[in-house]
Amino acid sequence: MPTSRATARATTLRDVAEAAGVSIKTVSNVVNDHPHVRPEMRERVRAVIDRLDYRPNGIGRQLRQGRTGLVALALPNVTYPYYGELTSALVTAARARGLTLLVEQTDADLEREREVAAGFPVRMVDGLVFVPLTMGVEELALRRDRTPAVLIGEHGDGSGLDRVTIDSIDIGTTATQHLLDAGRRRIAFLGDKSAHRSPVVAQRAAGYRTALERSGIEVDPDLLWPVPEWERRHGFEGATELLRAHPDVDAIFAANDLIAFGAMRALRLLGRRVPDDVAVLGVDDVEGAQYSAPTLTSIALDRSEMADLALGLLADRLAGSDAPPRLLSVKGELVVRESTGG
């Protein structure tokens, strides 16, 4: 069956104008709700728009108004449970503000983070939510792109940008104190990164030291055990090496849940019971923590709160705020489960 010119391809303003017998300018005025259009003319044009199923080019219209309604999110890796759950929370928070989120994965690669900070490849957006891991604070402070940006995470102190941070010192203190309260004394911090000591590593390790020192326990530097990356495999390998070198360890404070999952698998293969022989605690409280065997005690980070705070800061900048950079902090909450005897 032959199709009409208007339905064989996307309907244009010209198609509507020709079908309604009016100028393209008149159709544009109706589409953009300009007030100086006679009611009968507006009704006539809208009837043709409905009949031809015309869809205005929203992006083009928003660009003419100075906005796209798009916000970019640049973060290391959406396949990591924490980042995936954070992305979902940001999508929800953006949608509540009438914004659409575009996701750019940086893989924590320095050059990709630099491209994001410079405005590539996230062009045509109103704002940026950025989770940097590698880029230096000095570079962030000197970014050329003037797109309003908000940082999420511990990285970026002194960048001159709005930031939603996580109180990782408190996380380290809370986690270690919980293990001390459970009667553990040889507590290892699994997740140190001596080669690349990011702020989050330094802060969680600082909280760990603080809790031990308050309890009168001398910090054993050999129990700050490094791993290359915060992933299950490295948690498994790191815990295996740790327990072989220090079989008297009776608790592991893992820097995140993925490391903790890997550590619990290693302990099982080593014949060490969790929590009877070794208690294990993680950070992030990803969904899998509720379903591991045993279930994992973790420090929960409220992704919804972080997302709402970040989008609120960004919305203020988009509304024209020129206030000094703001720093909002989110604290973790201890969720006790089986891996520490809960």
Image (cartoon, rainbow, N blue to C red):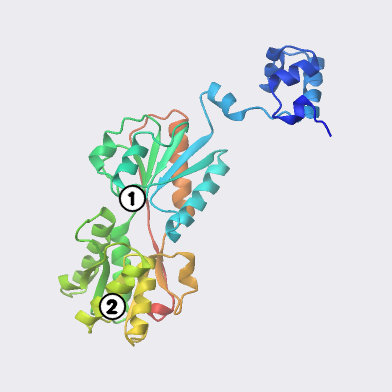
Q: Residue at x 44, y 35 (%)?
A: 127
Q: Residue at x 66, y 27 (%)?
A: 56
Quarter containing the C terminus = bottom left
Q: Quadrant of residue 146?
A: top left
User: Amino acid under label 1?
Assistant: Ala
**Separation of marks 2 and 1 at Cα, in angstroms:** 27 Å
Local crowd at mark 2 within 10 Å, few (<14), some, or many (≥20)? many
Local crowd at mark 1 within 10 Å, few (<14), some, or many (≥20)? some
Please state the horizontal and vertical placement of residue 300, each as a whole percent of the image. Answer: 42, 63
Is 273 situated above or below 263? below
Please state the horizontal and vertical placement of residue 250, each as a whole percent of the image. Answer: 27, 82
Residue 233 visible at all: yes
> To which residue does mark 1 refer?
108
N-term-proximal mark, 2 vs 1: 1
| Tag 1 secondary structure | loop
Is 115 situated above or below 259? above
User: Amino acid under label 2?
Assistant: Thr
Residue 160 vs residue 14: left or right? left
Please state the horizontal and vertical placement of residue 57, each as a whole percent of the image. Answer: 62, 27
Quarter containing the N terminus = top right
Q: Residue at x 53, y 25 (%)?
A: 63
Q: How many marks?
A: 2
| Tag 2 secondary structure | helix
Residue 34 visible at all: no
Along the line of sight, the residue nearer the viewer: 144 or 310: 144
Residue 43 vs residue 168: left or right? right
> To which residue does mark 2 refer?
240
Please state the horizontal and vertical placement of residue 328, each as a whole percent of the image. Answer: 37, 47
Along the line of sight, the residue nearer the viewer: 143 or 169: 143
Report the disc number at residue 152: none
Extreme residue toward the front, this view: 1
Along the line of sight, the residue nearer the viewer: 127 or 50: 50
